[in-house]
Image (cartoon, helix red, strand yellow):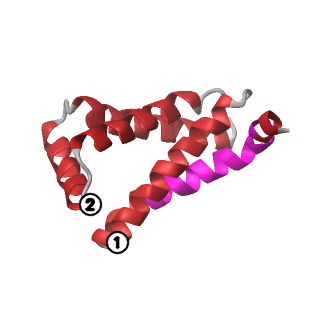
Amino acid sequence: MTAVTLFVGLLSAFFLFASSIKIFGWQKKIFEIQLGMFQSYGLNRQIMALVGCVELFGAIAIWFQSLWLGPLGALALLGTSLGAITCHLIFDSWKDGVPAMITATLSAIVLWSGLDKLLGLIG
């Protein structure tokens, strides 16, 4: 097993869990905390669900590393992680952004490992 495969598994598990809460709200305590954070950033429930959909796409697509879809999934997760870092740095403590910093780093590594497949789409 390579490090990239391990990172794909970790990212997928984390974002499947996180996205399911943002979309379905099945874990009430975490859902309320996340919704409160989104609202403190000036974002509503619909934006939270949209972020959850992007995370869900990334968590599934990232498994297809032999195709362009895998790096695109990593790019989606990197984008949501960077957005989370930005919001935490502006509105919260940097400490609240540590999980997003970790997922951004792992997503960037996975993206870099398959970047040639993604760039092959554009020429």
Q: Amino acid at mark 2?
A: Tyr
Residue at 74%, 38% (x, y): give it: 118
For mark 1, what is the residue?
Answer: 90
Residue at 13%, 43% (x, y): give it: 29
Is 67 placed above or below 13 here? above
Q: Does any portion of residue 111 appear in the rendered image?
A: yes
Q: Amino acid at mark 1?
A: Ile
Q: Does any portion of residue 7 appear in the rendered image?
A: no
Main SS category, magenta section: helix
Q: Secondary structure at mark 2?
A: loop
Q: Residue 102 lies in magenta, yes or no?
A: yes
Please state the horizontal and vertical placement of residue 54, each as a whole percent of the image. 45, 37
The answer to whether residue 74 is left or right of residue 34 is right
For mark 2, what is the residue?
Answer: 41
Q: Secondary structure at mark 1?
A: helix
Answer few, some or many: residues within 10 Å of disc 2's Cα (few below 14, many 20 plus, some between 14 and 19).
some
Residue at 81%, 41% (x, y): give it: 116
Marks 2 and 1: in contact by CB < 8 Å?
Answer: yes
Name the one closer to the observer, 1 or 7. 7
Q: Quadrant of the C terminus?
A: top right
Is 88 placed above or below 114 here? below
Q: Which residues are magenta?
A: 100-118
Q: Quadrant of residue 114?
A: top right
Q: Earlier in the sequence, mark 1 or mark 2?
A: 2
Is 87 placed above or below 45 here? below
